[in-house]
Image (spheres, rainbow, N blue to C red):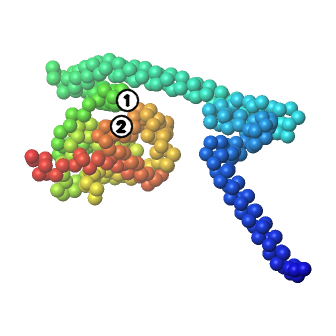
């Protein structure tokens, strides 16, 4: 009889059999599955895996999934104020109810906000309409007042100069002078209102030309000389040498400078000083600066002073006159030229007003000559 094999040889034979059967089964199964996958989808898609095989394979209902899908649809379509279905007794019932409460609040706030926006739009339209009506009224009234005022000024000048002979009593001449000055003052106020309403309505067009700034400064000083003497205020002017030419509307630029200087005279006590300076800044912008040693303003008062028809100190302004259009009108005129107006002021120390024109309005003397 043959001798029995050692146990380990039998183990090797069995192990080899297991390996061969395993390799054959794995390999043939892999090939078969690969062939089947070419014709039949064997694996769930990412979307099916995300939703869950219970729902995709067996049509099982998931309250959590339904809630998540409903919330996603609301987010995608912008329906954040709409409620979702509440599955009573489900594990997400509380979440769905809380979501509906939030959605109802969002919807309510959105409707209230939309109503407020509509009301604001209506109020804006009404304000614009009222502003246009106000501008039209002021413009019409200004035109209507100009003609009789010019007549009053002309007749009072004839009476003052006694063109047709003496009036007899000297007091009549004094009265005529007062009438003439009051008429001129009222005419200047009317002109300011007319300019303001014209700028608001966009009806002013710049008559641009080359402006000789030293000559303009001399003209302004001559215009305010009498007022400065009466107010006992000292005025000086400084134009930088070799100052280039400014391209702009000479009448409007002169009016801006005149408004700033007369405003400074009104609010500077006797013995005070006012300096009118024109300089060329490093960025080639021309700056027109009016600095005074007057009563000055706080920051809040400066902001109010830039609002049309605003009076800062009623008692003081009653004695000085004015419509509250000085600084707002200057700012509007500066913006017509593409420029800006800045105010630096300190209470009881004075105010500095600076008009800056854009660099493209600065012409060298050679360019101006061409």
Distance between the alpha carbons at the discs numbered 2 and 1:
9 Å
Taking the image as shown, residue 309 lies to the left or right of residue 221, namely right
Q: Pointer 2: what residue?
A: 332
Q: Pointer 1: what residue?
A: 200
Percent across and percent down for residue 43 are 68, 46
Q: How many marks?
A: 2
- 2 or 1: tag closer to the N-terminus: 1
Can residue 9 be seen here?
yes
Residue positioned most to the front: 1
Residue drawn where x is 83% and y is 74% of the image: 11
Percent across and percent down for residue 358 are 29, 47
Taking the image as shown, residue 56 lies to the left or right of residue 119, namely right
Residue drawn where x is 56% and y is 27% of the image: 120
Q: 195 and 295: which one is in front?
A: 195
Q: 18 and 57: which one is in front?
A: 18
Q: 10 Å neighbourhood of mark 2: few (<14), some, or many (≥20)? A: some
Contact, mark 2 vs mark 1 (Cβ under 8 Å): yes
Residue drawn where x is 71% and y is 34% of the image: 70
Q: Is residue 350 above or below residue 152?
A: below
Percent across and percent down for residue 151 are 25, 19
Taking the image as shown, residue 191 lies to the left or right of residue 305, namely left
Q: Is residue 38 above or below residue 31?
A: above
Residue drawn where x is 17% and y is 56% of the image: 242
Q: 300 and 162: which one is in front?
A: 300
């Amino acid at each position: 009889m043959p001798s029995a094999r050692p146990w380990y040889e039998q183990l090797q034979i069995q192990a080899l059999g297991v390996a061969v059967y395993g390799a054959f089964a794995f390999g043939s199964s892999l090939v078969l599955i690969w062939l089947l996958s070419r014709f039949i989808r064997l694996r769930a898609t990412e979307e099916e895996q995300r939703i869950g095989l219970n729902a995709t394979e067996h049509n099982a209902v998931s309250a959590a999934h339904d809630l998540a899908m409903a919330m996603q649809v609301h987010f995608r379509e912008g329906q954040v104020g709409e409620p979702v279905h509440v599955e009573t007794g489900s594990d997400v019932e509380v979440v769905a109810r809380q979501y509906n409460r939030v959605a109802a609040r969002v919807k309510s706030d959105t409707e209230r906000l939309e109503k407020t926006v509509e009301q604001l739009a209506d109020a804006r339209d009404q304000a614009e309409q009222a502003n246009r009506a106000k501008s039209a009224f002021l413009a019409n009234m200004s035109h209507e007042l100009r003609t009789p005022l010019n007549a009053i000024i002309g007749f009072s000048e004839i009476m003052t100069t006694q063109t047709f002979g003496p009036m007899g009593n000297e007091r009549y001449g004094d009265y005529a002078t007062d009438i003439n000055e009051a008429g001129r003052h009222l005419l200047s106020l009317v002109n300011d209102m007319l300019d303001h309403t014209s700028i608001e309505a966009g009806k002013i067009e710049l008559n641009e030309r080359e402006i000789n700034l030293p000559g303009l400064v001399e003209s302004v000083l001559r215009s305010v000389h009498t007022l400065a003497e009466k107010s006992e205020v000292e005025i000086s002017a400084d134009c930088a040498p070799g100052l280039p030419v400014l391209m702009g509307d000479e009448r409007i630029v002169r009016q801006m400078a005149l408004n700033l200087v007369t405003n400074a005279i009104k609010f500077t006590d006797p013995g005070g000083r006012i300096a009118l300076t024109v300089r060329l800044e490093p960025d080639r912008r021309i700056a027109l600066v009016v600095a005074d040693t007057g009563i000055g303003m706080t920051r809040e008062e400066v902001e109010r002073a830039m609002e049309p028809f605003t009076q800062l100190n009623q008692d003081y302004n009653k004695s000085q006159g004015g419509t509250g259009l000085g600084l707002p009108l200057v700012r509007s005129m500066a913006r017509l030229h593409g420029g800006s107006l800045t105010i630096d002021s300190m209470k009881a120390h004075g105010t500095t007003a600076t008009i800056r024109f854009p660099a493209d309005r600065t012409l060298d003397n050679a360019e101006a000559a061409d």
